[in-house]
Amino acid sequence: MVWFRQYRDMSDSIYKIFQPEEWETFKDTGIYHGSVHDKRDGFIHLCAADQINGTLAKHYGEVQNIVLASFSENKLDQVKWEVSRGGEKFPHVYGPLDMAAQRSHIHLTKSPSGQFTVPDHFLEAL
């Protein structure tokens, strides 16, 4: 956990977790206007590296496959860090995501034990 906190300070990467169908649409159009939940809340939910596992556990328990994409915060418009779960600040984007701000992505499948594992090399490569 300490490594993630240090990582947050060294990088402008923030992360979006996509359902595979959402990712395919984003890939095809280059613009993402948000999930049903994002639209309901009025902003696109993202997270920092040290918030990925908690977000996956809380919101993706019934999902078998996801796409985790990293974005350069500096290339996104209207990013606000706002207090959310557990009093922690999360990045929220008040506008669409543009594929040009995306750095990399990885397809993840839940393990037989019921967890997603984000490989260290995905975070370290940024």
Image: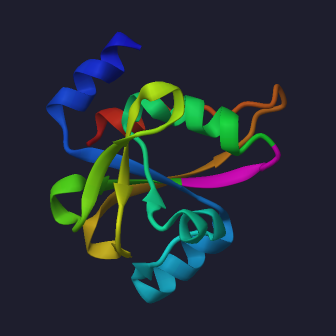
Which residue of the protein is positioned furthest toward the bottom in this rendering? 29
Q: How far from the left and from the top, in percent, is residue 78? A: 24, 65
Residue at image point 58% right, 38% down? 55
Residue appearing at x 47%, y 38% in the figure: 84
Asked whether 88 falls inside the magenta stretch, the response is: no
Q: Residue at x 68, y 44 (%)?
A: 59
On the question of residue 92 being in view, the answer is yes
Q: Position of residue 111 (x, y in %)?
A: 76, 33
Picture quadrant of residue 6: top left
User: Magenta stretch containing residue 64, yes or no?
Assistant: yes
Q: Quadrant of the C terminus?
A: top left
* Residue 53 point in image, percent of width and height: 56, 30
Position of residue 50 in the picture relative to residue 62 (left or right): left
Q: Identify whether 48 is placed above or below 72.
A: above
Rendering quarter of residue 56: top right
For the record, the magenta segment spans: 62-67
Q: How many marks?
A: 0
Q: How is the image coloured?
A: rainbow
Q: Is residue 101 left or right of residue 105?
A: left
Q: At x 54% / y 62%, what residue is drawn?
A: 41
x then y, percent, for residue 98: 32, 75
Question: Relative to 53, is 109 on the left or the right?
Answer: right
